[in-house]
Image (cartoon, helix red, strand yellow):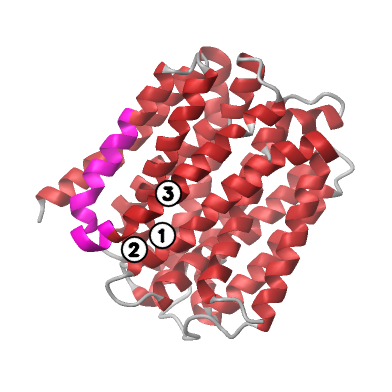
Amino acid sequence: MRVPPLALLMAAVTLVGSNSLALSPVALEVGRGFGGASAQEVLVAASLFGAGTAVSAVGIAPYADRIGLSRALFLALCVLTLGMAGTALAPALWVVWVAQGVAGIGSGVALPATYGLAAEIAPKGRESTFLGRVLMGWTLSLVFGASAAALIAEVAGWRAVHGALAGLGAAVLLALVLSPRLGEARAAQGASPWAALRVPGIGAALFVAGGYMAAFYGLYAYVATHLQAGLGWPVWMAGAVPLVYGIGFGAAALGDPWIDRWGARQVAPFVFGALVVLYLGLAAVAGSGLALVAACLLWGMINHLGLNLIVGRLAGMDASRRGAILGLNSGVTYLAMFVSTAGFGWVEAGWGFAACAVVSAVCVLPALGDALRLRMAR
């Protein structure tokens, strides 16, 4: 039985998202399994995942335009699945670090290939709607990946989490083999990742993407730790954060057609402005676990729309260099993840979770300023 193209692309995003988000809720459990290592030590793996993704997205993803995005996606998911299996079988913490670095290499190609294929198969005028459906993979990764990770770790141990992800990766690979090729197999104008930097407007777009994703990943990495170590919540209750966030992220897909209808330039200032206010709100309710979890519903909704705006803008810049452009986006995204996971850890250790939320608000200000500039330029 053949799987619909959008479902395959959604599944690919789900795998990448689940791997990148599953470690944080179980970081304390992983540490206990390796001689009482701290959450910060365990989350070095998340930083290495981000670094591997960034290097791969910039150095390898541009070649996806040359071999075809569909083939590139298959090969990337093979590497990602290998990394997830290595994490599940790791005999020492440093092996977890290495395995997550390998998983990052696969993710650095998988995400731009997936987003690029979504843009290729979308009917004209419905790009945001199609991209929004593919982004639903992040909802699945949050609801069934990150949230389930806490429950699985509680019942069967943290190794079962990444073992299950590796099994899902194998299933997606099989579905890709049995399905017809997605998108077009065409040669790119060039494979150099730096050639895409000559596309007009890409510098500002990548700067916005970097700040936006640093705000999210830096804060998300320490939500579960704050709830457990700071507010005394057990692991399974901390899993409510990705669940509620994921529900909001998925519900916001209903608003994606509005972007197609009204135009990204009209919508963007409201989305990014709302996100700045939301991060400040998270800082204000940091002392209340229930209020923090409730606010995550709005966080997910606004982040979905913002991510659609950012990726849609980049995907529409130059179709012939789509793999290279989206590869640069993934590189910037996970470089931001690498830097913010470490940097926010320093802020959290010194000033607490509320200070991290304020830093996230500051990181989104460039996106708001750029959106206002583009709207006034019309």
Under mark 3, the amino acid is Ala
Determine if residue 301 is in view: yes
The image quadrant of residue 77 is bottom right
| Residue denoted by label 3 | 251
Q: In this view, does 174 lie above or below 48?
A: below
Q: Tags 2 and 3 in contact by the CB under 8 Å rule?
A: no
Q: Please tell me which of labels 3 and 1 falls first in the chain.
A: 1
Q: In this view, does 281 lie above or below 198?
A: above
Disc 3 residue crowd, few under 14, some 14–19, many 20+, Cα 10 Å = some
Q: Is residue 230 left or right of residue 330?
A: right
**Which residue is painted at 30% across and 65% down in the image?**
199
Q: Would residue 275 be counted in the magenta stretch? A: yes
The quadrant in which the N terminus is found is bottom right
Under mark 2, the amino acid is Ser
Q: Which mark is residue 132?
A: 1
Under mark 1, the amino acid is Gly
Q: Which mark is residue 128?
A: 2
Q: Would residue 139 be counted in the magenta stretch? A: no
Q: Looking at the picture, how far across and down is residue 233, in whole percent?
A: 66, 20
